[in-house]
Image: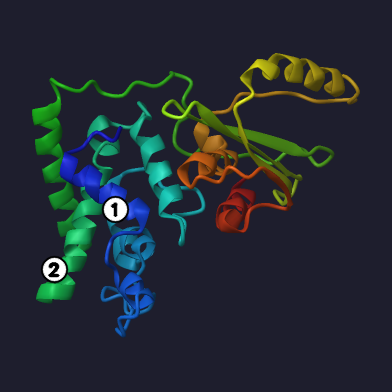
């Protein structure tokens, strides 16, 4: 659960659900308005644009001291962007006063947008981040005795760690998994990339056949014995973003149909390309 007030948790849920009434959403419902962003006058005002990729939002995030994704925030997936912020909020190498304030940053970005649209009031990035810090510090100080600060393994990486390409003679297969305790079902995925970082193929699957896992693992290790060279490595979430995002999509969007696809998912092309350029 995100450590913030019920009002802001509801706001985050609305952001993920596409329920914030940005201009692009209103236009998609048949309301004939100009959907151009009032901050930058260049992009369409989508939820992702207002909260993450508008030049105004980028300036705010640059001032936030929260580590940003190596390839930048996604332009079309609020889910991926919030997933990154949630992972950062659990990173004990980042000061708690910094990593836990992201809900207030998003909320004050939205309030600044509304002030511009309805009252023609312009707020600078520094004033937005200052108000977000103030609101977060007050709430977290009051709430501190009741909720423990999230802990993570000491092996969690420092900022600047991300997915790495394999050696030229190898391919790399990242595996992701997700779990729903409410429905006792899981999502699993894998994606194979070459030494250039290009996705060769991927798979998504919903699986409830836990008793068979032991025999499947035995079969996997038997097949691996036929390779001249192979290795298995456990990596932290920030090094496995693409595979995890595919697995999480099973539960997040009820995508229970299993499949195997060539290259990578189109909706993750921005992330795959970004990781390839940095890995």
With 263 as the anchor, is 132 left or right in this view?
left
Residue at x-position 42% and y-position 43%? 84
Disc 1 from disc 2: Cα separation = 19 Å
Above or below 59: residue 181: above
Q: Name the residue under label 2.
A: 115
Q: Position of residue 34 (x, y in %)?
A: 31, 84
Q: In which quarter of the image is the C terminus?
A: top right
Task: Look at 12% across and 36% down and name the residue there.
Answer: 139
Q: Can residue 126 be seen in this view?
A: no
- The tag earlier along the polypeptide, 1 or 2, is 1
Q: Which residue is drawn at 12% across and 76% down?
A: 120
The part of the image, by quadrant, that contains residue 121 is bottom left
Give the SS element for disc 1.
helix
- Indicate the position of residue 80 as horizontal and vertical percent values: 46, 48
Q: What element carries label 2?
A: helix
Taking the image as shown, residue 209 lies to the left or right of residue 226, namely left
In this rendering, the answer to whether 27 lies above or below 133 is below
Q: Which mark is residue 227?
A: none
| Residues at marks 1 and 2 touching, judged by CB atoms closer than 8 Å | no
Image quadrant occupied by the N terminus: top left
Q: Mark 1 points at which residue?
A: 14
Q: Does the image show residue 5? A: yes
Q: Residues within 10 Å of mark 1 (few under 14, many from 20)?
A: some
Residue pictured at 37% horizontal, 42% vertical? 85
Q: Nearer the viewer, mark 1 or mark 2?
A: 1
Please tell me which residue lies in front, 40 or 220.
220
């Amino acid at each position: 659960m995100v450590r913030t007030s019920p009002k802001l948790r509801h706001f985050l849920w609305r952001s993920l659900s596409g329920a914030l009434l940005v201009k692009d959403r209103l236009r998609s419902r048949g309301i004939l308005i100009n959907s151009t962003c009032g901050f930058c006058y260049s992009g369409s005002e989508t939820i992702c644009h207002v909260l993450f990729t508008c030049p105004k939002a980028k300036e705010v995030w640059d001032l936030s001291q929260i580590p940003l994704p190596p390839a930048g925030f996604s332009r079309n997936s609020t889910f991926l962007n919030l997933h990154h912020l949630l992972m950062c909020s659990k990173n004990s190498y980042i000061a708690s006063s910094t990593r836990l304030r992201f809900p207030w940053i998003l909320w004050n970005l939205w309030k600044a947008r509304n002030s511009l649209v309805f009252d023609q009031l312009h707020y600078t990035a520094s004033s937005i981040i200052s108000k977000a810090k103030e609101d977060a510090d007050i709430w977290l100080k009051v709430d501190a005795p009741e909720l423990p600060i999230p802990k993570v393994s000491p092996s969690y990486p420092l900022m600047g760690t991300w997915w790495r390409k394999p050696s030229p003679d190898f391919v790399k297969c990242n595996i992701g998994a997700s779990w729903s305790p409410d429905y006792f079902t899981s999502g699993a995925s894998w994606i194979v990339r070459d030494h250039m970082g290009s996705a060769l193929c991927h798979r998504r699957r919903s699986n409830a056949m836990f008793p068979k896992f032991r025999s499947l693992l035995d079969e996997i290790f038997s097949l691996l014995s036929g390779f001249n060279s192979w290795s298995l490595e456990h990596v932290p979430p920030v090094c496995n973003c693409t595979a995890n995002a595919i697995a999480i999509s099973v539960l997040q969007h009820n995508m229970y149909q299993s499949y195997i696809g060539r290259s990578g998912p189109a909706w993750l092309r921005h992330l795959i390309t970004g990781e390839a350029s940095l890995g």
